[in-house]
Image (cartoon, rainbow, N blue to C red):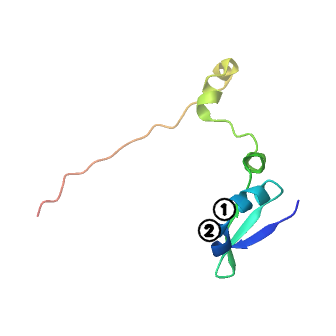
Amino acid sequence: MPITTLSSRAFNQDASGAKKAANSGPVFITDRGKPAHVLLSMADYQRLLGHQARISDLLAMPEAASVAFEPPKVVLGSRPADLS
């Protein structure tokens, strides 16, 4: 997996070339010589994230009914406003 490094200026002048390079591997975009951003293909990005379940998906699962879940009680306190 080759890594490509481009300056911000080169990236701005050839964004389509940077996108093509990202299909082969990450593209580091530098700002004043320091890495500032990384351009990845969507496939690489999704592989990096892995499978992350959303809470709505987990709660919709039929086997979720057997999971013990008792959230702690929240006690909200209030005090009178000081208008002095």
Real-space Cα distance between discs 1 and 2?
6 Å
The structure residue drawn at horizontal position 88% and vertical position 59%, both measured from the top left corner, is: 1
Q: Position of residue 37 (x, y in %)?
A: 66, 66
Amino acid tagged 2: Asn
For residue 28, which quarter of the picture? bottom right
Dot 2, how many residues are within 10 Å of its Cα: few (below 14), some (14-19), or many (20+)?
few
Q: Position of residue 58 (x, y in %)?
A: 65, 29
Compared across the picture, whether 79 is left or right of 32 comes to left
- Secondary element under disc 1, as helix, strand or loop, is helix
For residue 82, which quarter of the picture? bottom left
Which label was assigned to residue 81?
Answer: none
Compared across the picture, whether 36 is left or right of 75 comes to right
The structure residue drawn at horizontal position 70% and vertical position 63%, both measured from the top left corner, is: 38
Residues at circles 1 and 2 in contact by the CB criterion of under 8 Å: yes
Compared across the picture, whether 20 is left or right of 53 comes to right
Amino acid tagged 1: Ala
Which label was assigned to residue 15?
Answer: 1
The structure residue drawn at horizontal position 61% and vertical position 26%, both measured from the top left corner, is: 59
In the picture shown, does residue 25 fall above or below 49?
below
Residue that lies at the very extreme toward the top in this rendered image = 62
Asked whether 59 or 50 is in front, the reply is 50
Q: Position of residue 78 (x, y in %)?
A: 28, 48
Q: Which residue is mark 2?
A: 12
In the picture shown, does residue 72 fall above or below 34?
above
Dot 1, how many residues are within 10 Å of its Cα: few (below 14), some (14-19), or many (20+)?
few
